[in-house]
Image (cartoon, rainbow, N blue to C red):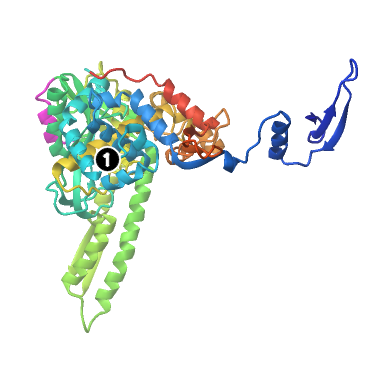
Amino acid sequence: MYIETVPNRRSRPTILLREGWREGKKTPKRTLSNLTDWPAEKIEALRQLLAGRRMVPADEAYATEKSRAHGHVEAVLEMVRRLGLETLIASKRSRQRDLVVAMIVQQLLDADSKLGMTRLWRTSTLAQELGVEDADVDELYDALDWLRARQERIERRLAARHLEEGGRALYDVSNSRYEGRTCPLARLGRDKDSDRCRLVIAYGVMTDAHGCPVAVEVYAGDTGDPATVPDQVDKLRGRFGLERIVLVGDRGMLTQARIERLKEFPQLGWISALRSDAIRKLIVQGAIQPSLFDRQDLAEIVSPDFPGERLMVCYNPLLAEERRRTRQDLLQATEKEFAPIQRDAARRTHTPLSAEEIALRVGRVANRFKMAKHFDLTIADNRFVWNRKTQAIEAEQALDGIYVVRTSESAERLEPDNTVRAYKNLTDVERAFRFLKSPDIRIRPIRHHTEDHVRAHVLLCLLAYYVEWHMRRVLAPLLFDEENLEEARQRRDPVKPARPTPEAQRKKSQRRTAEGLPIHSWKTLMAHLANRTRNWCRIAAQRSDQPPFRFEQLTECDPLQAKVFERIRLFPGYGNPK
């Protein structure tokens, strides 16, 4: 007997159980039963039985003792090894290195406290892969101390890999809230995420020209951004041994005082931007005139107020219109909040409002909308009057859409278009802060008690972002991230707002790759990879006098998972770090 499938043109195939025998040179056959309505698994079981195989119920053949998520661990560890990150941290394998790598990977998979990590990495195969199943929280803190002691060596190797003489380095500073009272780095300051005054710790991140992280420095929470610049200059010239490099920082970072200090190093270039008061002065002097933008939106000028510098004046009409509209909305919202205060002050005759009470209410409104500079305020007992400063508003409107990029680099080294692009690439550092603070890495809130542990925690998060930065570029075709971003930036107008490329728009609209695979976010792709599990099984159909036979089995890759591993394995890596 055998099973035969008979195809039909306009309906599903017919499945028949048949019997055949030999009559001379002929093989007659007859149908014993029609199995078309049987479930596919039942037909396959009968097919195997007819082939002479012994059939055992699945629950009697073997038992799955435990199962652990593995695919996301496999992908991240493969990327870590392709990057040579283990040898970059330490050339020889050790218990401390394995713990540090495990913390870096866990920070990407599901960030938590160090105690939480020792619990979480046992829910996946991470602890087994790195041999740290027995690690406790005290070992993790010892490994943090070990990592902190190696920070200079690690950053020097990263700089040798990603920075070069004559290249550019991007730098910016952010902060994160601190939970606790013991760390001396935690100071009262403005939290850049919530704009509230709270205990924060500041940290500055340096990247290469493409946004790849290279180094990080931690500062007390009340440290001003410009005060961190000298440390970065010393790091570039001293620790990294780079004489000729261009430092790119925003106008709040590279202030005039810091730029004067940078001029003491002729081989050290810089790119920054002018503040609004300096731009207003150039307009008053006539150095910036509307006729500059009759045919172009970018013009290079010089000014005796900025000797030895090149100034790239940019005008973005879309940005100008947006700022005018935002200003008018904020002015109207401020006046709407002022009106009830004015009415209360005028009608309360029996219990008049004091000037102090009125000032407190007005101050809350002014701080909320940041428009106090555009109003003349008259406050007295039972009296509140305001008027717009029309001349100041018009003077500020004259600056709308205009910004000026300044640089020490000559035109031979850096053309005007590329100067503006280089300054706008600071968004890559802002993106680094966004990812560091996101649920992907979760650098905040910072809870460590000692200064060294805080510094090591921030370094650990930077190394996790280093892995994610490379993985995002390798897996960009499978993510909503824009592919070939560097080439797209070179084609775009340096002044106008960036727009997504046609390829990026296609991905967002179709949500599938050219191969038909679904497009994912980073979070959902990691979750999908985690569906590839490692299973620990035991043969159940054994004699009682035999020892149990156990084996491990990996879930087969689906097409998307296979594509992820294929792309990661195609990454060439960097070889041995210097």
**Quadrant showing the N terminus:** top right
Residue topped by disc 1: 135
For residue 254: magenta? Answer: yes
SS for tag 1?
loop
- Image position of 302 with respect to 400: above or below: above
**Dividing the image into 4 quarters, which one contains the C terminus?**
top left
Q: Which percent across, then down, holds residue 21?
A: 86, 24
Whether the magenta-drawn stretch holds residue 338 is answered as no
Q: Is residue 220 visible?
A: yes
> Is residue 297 among what the camera can see?
no
Q: Residue at x 31, y 62 (%)?
A: 335
Q: Is the residue 413 above or below the residue 71 in the image?
A: above
Q: Which residues are magenta?
A: 250-266
Q: Is residue 197 above or below residue 105?
A: below
Q: Nearer the viewer, residue 324 or 230?
A: 230
Mark 1 Cα-neighbour bin, 10 Å: few <14, some 14–19, many ≥20: some
Residue 390: % across, % down:
27, 53
Task: Identify the amino acid type marked 1.
Answer: Ala
Tell me which corner region of the image, top left, top right, bottom left or bottom right, holds residue 169. Answer: top left
- Residue nearest the viewer, comparing 155 with 223: 155
Residue farthest along the bottom direction in this orientation: 350
User: In this rendering, would 182 be left or right of 210?
Assistant: left
Q: Position of residue 375 (x, y in %)?
A: 24, 58
Q: Quadrant of residue 153?
A: top left
Residue 379, image x, y percentages: 19, 68
